[in-house]
Image (tube, grey):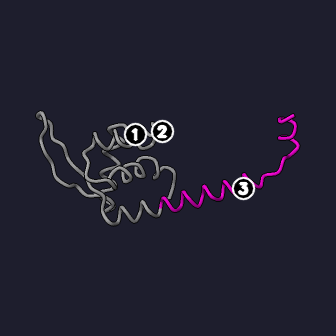
Amino acid sequence: MTAKWLQPSFWILTVLTTGRRHGYDIMREASAASEGQVELKVTTLYAALERLEREGLLAADGEEVVNGRARRYYRITDAGSGRLTHEVEVLERSARTARARLATRTATPTTALAEA
């Protein structure tokens, strides 16, 4: 899976693990959960929602009208939970590998000069 997949899709599915949400809630919660690292734009969000729905990773879960505006709700599917679990495992393995390599890194002439 690619970083391109990870940004909007990862955070959308992560938000939906706690229950059904409508678009604005997904945008707000993705920003909060990522500590501001991800700010989904409306067009990006809805394109990702449509793609994830086509892929069977999330499903529409009702609509309501609030203050004259329609809200469409989404929920994560079992396939979406499985995909998110897989992505989390990939990220964890990658982080472990990077940490291990950083821990065993030896000083090179370039880093030794920079530290002097």
Residue on which the image places disc 3: 101
Residue 104, placed above or below residue 69: below
Q: Is 39 on the left or on the right of 56, as rendered?
A: right
Instruction: Give how far apart the Cα atoms at labels 1 and 3 are.
Output: 31 Å
Q: Secondary structure at mark 2?
A: loop
Q: Nearer the viewer, residue 5 or 19?
A: 19
Secondary structure beneath label 1: helix
Viewer-proximal residue among 7 and 105: 105
Q: Secondary structure at mark 3?
A: helix
Residue bounds of the magenta highlight? 87-116
Q: Residues within 10 Å of mark 1 (few under 14, many from 20)?
A: some
Q: Quadrant of the C terminus?
A: top right
Sort mark 2 into few (<14), some (14-19) or many (20+) by Cα contacts within 10 Å. Answer: few
Query: Which tag, 2 or 1, sits closer to the chain's start?
Result: 1
- x, y percent for residue 68: 11, 34
The Cα atoms of the two marked residues, 2 and 3, are separated by: 25 Å
**Residue 76, placed above or below residue 42:** below
| Residue type pointed to by label 3 | Arg
Front one among 47 and 67: 67
* Disc 1 target residue: 32
Which label's residue is closer to the chain start, 1 or 3?
A: 1
Circle 2 or circle 1, nearest the eye: 1
Q: Residue at x 36, y 37 (%)?
A: 41
* Residue identified by numbered label 2: 37
